[in-house]
Amino acid sequence: SSGINAEYGGEVVVNQNDLDARLSRENHPPREARERIEAEYEEEEDVETLKYGAKHVMMLIVPVSVCMMLVIAIIRTVTMYDQGTQPQVYLVYTPFHENNKNITTGSPVSDAVLNMLIVVSLVVVMTCFLVLLYKYRCYKIIYGWLFLSSLILLFMFSFIYLQEVIVRFNVAMDYITCGYIVWNFGVMGIISIFWKGPLILQQAYLVITSAFMALVFIKFLPEWTLWFLLGGIAIYDLFAVLCPKGPLRILVELAESRNEPIFPALIYSSTVMWTITGMTEPSDPNYNQLNESNSSTPSGNAAPSPHRPPAPNNTGTQQHDPEMEPPEQGVKLGLGDFIFYSVLVGKAATADDWNTVMACFFAILIGMCLTLLILAVVKRALPALPISIFVGIIFFVGTRFCIKPICDRLAIGQVYI
């Protein structure tokens, strides 16, 4: 799932009674006083909107930065993901490469384009299949699919990575201890993502699964194919989110029309993704109705509107439940964006040049800020990949093939700027 969405709130609202009260206390003529006070209110509103926008920019910059730094750290510490030191094994979806002499076209560019078309076509088909399942409310199939994917990432890939770390740092550990660590790590992740847990824990596991998936692409995709795939996915993201018949746009519109959250295994949210049903007494006449409505929602994640007042208790006072309060407005970013951001930065990390890594890292963040700036203007779901990916590729090419040779030449001549 790719795209960025924000729910805007918290704007300053001009209270007419307060405005009239302030006007009545002024000694200036009514028209001049009204214009001055309205200008002050507009300035307060602009300041509040700026603070709100900056807050949500940081809500996305921090997790994206952590995900990219995690991928960089793994690549720099574990040689498994360096294609130059390991036998080259590629995904079955990319049959065109130099190792397969029976299928290759002989040109790395032609092979990369064909592989990119195959992978993007697979992404389109699987996304449309997901939208059809969601449209016809096949929630159990979707949850089973996402559950299996998360299970593989959290258990199998975490075990592989732990094994590589043990070998890399020559740590003595038996299989029982290793299995115990992986089991606790995986079970806690499944509970946090698919059931309930602290928000920070759910966010951490979503970032970790995105990093693991990015490492899979870096390891098992040919180099030329990976770069063409980044561009192809960014172009597809434009179509999928902005086109009226785009699959991701249809998915978002369906979720909004049903007043349901998109599955937490697909979306990173800065606020709680699931809603807790309010404390309702059995004597409440709406109790049975609430139970019936909850039983028809997917996995019980959707609940009555949080704006519904709490049920009265036996003393005649209202029962205050903090969990019934409306959740804080937040931003949502597809995990696919996390994955391909990290793929770009991780691939730059394999080049063994920190200038290139830092250039790509900050290019991604600059692209995100530009996307959020556009989002603040249009206030609708936007694709988060195109700007960041294309800016990142431009920075990578410029730094790797222009700035790096200049820096190397200056270092050889011992010239310091």
Image: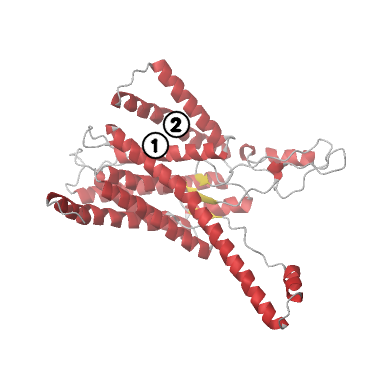
Residue 192 x/y as whole percent: 55, 34
Q: Are marks 2 and 1 in contact (CB under 8 Å)?
A: yes
Residue 94, image quadrant? top left
Is residue 200 among the parts visible in the rendering?
yes
Within-10-Å neighbours for mark 1: few <14, some 14–19, many 20+: many
Residue 228 x/y as whole percent: 29, 51
Residue 44, image quadrant? bottom right
SS assignment at label 1: helix
Q: Earlier in the sequence, mark 2 or mark 1?
A: 2
Task: Between residue 238 and residue 254, name the one nearer to us.
Answer: 238
Is residue 114 among the parts visible in the rendering?
no
Task: Identify which amino acid the numbered label 2 is placed on.
Answer: Leu
Position of 212 with respect to 137 (left or right) is: left
Q: CA distance from mark 2 to mark 1?
A: 8 Å
Residue 365 x/y as whole percent: 40, 53
Position of 221 with respect to 286 (left or right) is: left
Residue at point 76%, 75% (across, down): 24
Task: Between residue 35 and residue 148, name the one nearer to us.
Answer: 35
Residue 55 x/y as whole percent: 53, 54
Residue at point 44%, 44% (across, down): 126
Position of 214 with respect to 60 (left or right) is: left
Q: Which residue in the structure is indicated by mark 2?
A: 154
Task: Between residue 353 and residue 340, name the one nearer to us.
Answer: 353
Would you place residue 376 above or below residue 153 in this image? below
Q: Which residue in the structure is indicated by mark 1?
A: 212
SS assignment at label 2: helix
Residue found farthest to the right: 315
Task: Between residue 26 and residue 40, name the one nearer to us.
Answer: 26
Quadrant showing the C terminus: bottom left
Position of 207 with respect to 194 (left or right) is: left
Residue at point 30%, 22% (across, down): 170
Task: Identify which amino acid the numbered label 1 is placed on.
Answer: Phe
